[in-house]
Amino acid sequence: MIFSNLNINKDEPIYIQIERHIKQGIKNGELKKDSKLPSTREVSKFLNISRNSVISAYEELESIGVITTKRGIGTFISIESENESYEYNVDFSKRINNYGTTLKKFDIIKSELPYKKGMISFKSISPESHLFNLDDFKRSLLDAWTYEEANLLNYGYAKGYKPLIDYFLDYMRDKRVDTNNKDILVTNGFTEAFDIVISSLTNNGDIILCEEPTHNTALKIMKAYGLKIIQVKMDKEGLDLVSLENALSKYNPKFGYLIPSYNNPTGIVTKTERRKEIYKLFRKYSVPIIEDGFNEELLYSSSPIDPIASLCGTGNGVIYIGSLSKILFPGLRIGWIFADDNLIETLESVKRGRNIHSSFLDQSAFFYYLKSGAFSRYVKNVRKYYRDKYNLVLDMVEKYIPYEYITGEGGLHVFIKLKNNINARTLLELCYKDNVLFMPGDIFYENSNDNVEFHTKTDDNKPITHRKKSLKGYDTFRIGFGRVSDEDIKKGIEIIGKNIRLLDN
Amino acid sequence: MIFSNLNINKDEPIYIQIERHIKQGIKNGELKKDSKLPSTREVSKFLNISRNSVISAYEELESIGVITTKRGIGTFISIESENESYEYNVDFSKRINNYGTTLKKFDIIKSELPYKKGMISFKSISPESHLFNLDDFKRSLLDAWTYEEANLLNYGYAKGYKPLIDYFLDYMRDKRVDTNNKDILVTNGFTEAFDIVISSLTNNGDIILCEEPTHNTALKIMKAYGLKIIQVKMDKEGLDLVSLENALSKYNPKFGYLIPSYNNPTGIVTKTERRKEIYKLFRKYSVPIIEDGFNEELLYSSSPIDPIASLCGTGNGVIYIGSLSKILFPGLRIGWIFADDNLIETLESVKRGRNIHSSFLDQSAFFYYLKSGAFSRYVKNVRKYYRDKYNLVLDMVEKYIPYEYITGEGGLHVFIKLKNNINARTLLELCYKDNVLFMPGDIFYENSNDNVEFHTKTDDNKPITHRKKSLKGYDTFRIGFGRVSDEDIKKGIEIIGKNIRLLDN
């Protein structure tokens, strides 16, 4: 009896399980073509289930032509179980182009030391999820469903969910940005926004100016498109103006990519006066700016600073990329490009050519969440929570880590440059053995050669392995604390300090 | 009084409205720096609202540094209203590269005649949304939320939602595909899946073989990446084998892109025997196949046909792209790439580099929907519904349209080649005046020159404008009927017939 080895489970409708069982029987040759199936009555009796389940299973299988019922005679398998195969193999590794190879090579999820359960990890700069106000979100999700229903399941618009676009336009106006002749394209977070801008407005070999150090994802994407990256050095107030003007005049770059509100990884906040100077220089050399609004909302104390885009008035020289996901629901991949409306019209076609549109379920739920005021409430709470953690981190660093400098005006991370040329990757290897993880700083610098490794000895002849010592930023690292408990912050930073002393003698 | 021009609405929390009002007051200069605000008591009295709303508004504004409260003295604006701007403008139209320009040029949403309210439109091949089982979906959405909660709001995995990946692997096994050494990457529908494969595995100038005609979105994407497209002609059973072998030997293509299950636009279904011959030819010339599983589930009568991927056994020569969204919830952008597991590992990094991951809310809700059996129930219902519409369309076409041939084995559309060189775009212009829309066939052909227009006269000297007559497929068009009422199908096709007679004399 074909059903003797079928165990019905409770999670799934029974008729589905019967269907699958028969299909598998055909596949593995147990049920040959034209062989007869037991009647629905027999099966229901044998498995002690309702006969209707068996009937619907048989009906379904008949409707797709797998079985045929002959009145008064019985039900028969109507397809072959055999499935000839003619293998052939392709070596795809040889076929992956430079774009694919680069994205894999610089995929830090794969190249960096992985988190293991029980470790203290300062690697992530994501927010703490137990702060999410889940009930508020669930309510917004249900609101979205109630108001939109089938609309969320039909094709949406490449540009995005209209109420959310309008919300983001208001949001820009609140930041005193002129929205005339501007428009918004909703994207799957910052990453897609940046990818769409870069892929549509640059060509292989173009030069892009950016901060040194800068967001590693942006570096990765620019490399994948074969762009030349010139990093301009920063002081604690932001881009160094002299170096910036030199670079602008020397390289005639296609764009500048800036994270003025909250540079990743340094956490440096560029204040209004410096922003104006930077903006004026880019304008002087008529180089458009791609402004990354990263973490604007997380400024703890200082009064709000208008984005560079606000300096542009009715001009279009600044392309602003916004995203709230770094402080709110990283899993909701929602960001936006704010730019010249004709440009947005083209980028809209690019978005459509890539994935038609972003999830309307996400966009709509997110809209109702923002509209309800839950976001403001949320930000208000977490600001206090993260400010306390931030101060704790500063205290611990003071206590345990001999640094050349530390930067970061709040947010969810700080950035440290070590004293005495200590190599952060060597340090990381030691800390990893002690179950402590952080993000080595070199990934935020444009480094052409990146697998250098060599060995030296300390004065008292201890061997040290230096990895990537020749790399820019080799003696820097980022500490993300958003998801680390106070206790672990204390333990973790003390361990890092201990290992620094091991290397530093 | 700054609040005299504020009208409280009911949709939004009051404190948000107060906050916004004050921010706007600052922006438009009404509230200068250091000017004093009315006390919370005064405001609540004046607006006749709870004082707590005013207090939270003031607290929020203070926490972001917009206002300062001096104990016993009052609350004051602490930022400048002025916002110097230094315009500058960039002509982005000159900066958009070939990729962006191509995607815009071939964006049919922008280039084709738009639907207007009240029209009878055969343009869409989307499913009818009143058939969606919304309650089932809502239940699945709530299941997803209940089981996953915060997980859906945290970063997910680039590869996709694990339970959904496993579901799709089972789905492939049910189609008798060998899943050893294979893996799945979840994407935002077919479009992103195809875009990721093409962008990672081809280089400018590479040659791709595909069916003639074929899916216009695929053509658009390949053009955007500068690929050479060779279309191989089809007969009613699928690709013509002689032409295929000629093309394979002559062009040494990088890939073949095939829609064997349900060619778009012709609706031709390639049966098992022909699939084997096609597959063997590609294997003979070791050209990998990208198989588009488009609408497999919508075969009405004929018994199920295994995908070409099933012929490959443990080999990796076929990359299969699946998507259920064409028959189920087009708005849920969910599709998948099934391929060699090492290849998937690279494509996973590409996906991460583009948008980190697809919506986990969509993926999870979709998984619980599929798991509940709602999908099988749905397909069972709609098959009958669409089969009836399909037969109605065939009857009407027989009655009104003089065609050279008509193709389409069910699904949601049929494809027609007109008699006597009638230009489908000229026909469309006439029908458009009668409020009837359909999709002209030339967009499914590789056509280099595409703005030809010339004029001729009919025998009795009526002038006719021929647009794109020189284009391949100029005398073909697609009729999508999924969303058209029976009555409109009758009316619409009769109108098309009437206009054909006008042109055909």
Image (spheres, coloured by chain):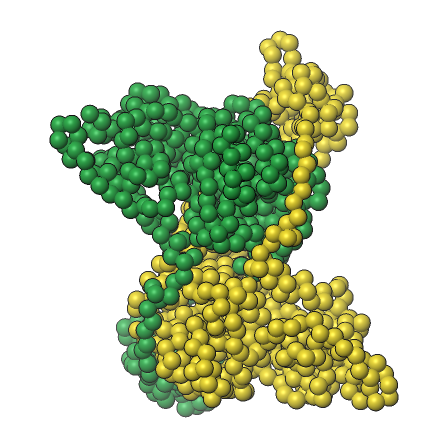
Chain colours: A green, B yellow
Of the pair A222 and A410, the residue shown nearer to us? A222
Quadrant into which the N terminus of chain B falls: top right
Q: Residue A482 location, x and y as percent?
A: 40, 33
Q: Is residue A202 above or below residue A131?
A: below
Give me the residue at 52% from left, 71% from top.
Answer: B228
Residue lying at 31% horizontally and 28% vertically, measured from the top left: A418
Q: Is residue B453 above or below residue A221?
A: below
Seen in the image, is A422 located left or right of residue A138?
A: left
B261 in relation to B218, above or below: below
Please tell me in which quadrant of the rendered image residue B31 appears. Answer: top right
Query: Which quadrant does the C terminus of chain B fall into?
Result: bottom right
B213 displayed left or right of A109 = right
The residue at the point 55 percent across, 50 percent down is A197
- Where is residue A483 shown, x and y percent of the image? 38, 35
Quick one: A254 or B368, which is closer to the camera?
A254
- Residue ID at (41%, 70%): B319
Whether residue B174 is visible here, answered yes or no, is no
Name the outermost residue toward the top: B72
In which quarter of the view is residue B221 placed?
A: bottom right
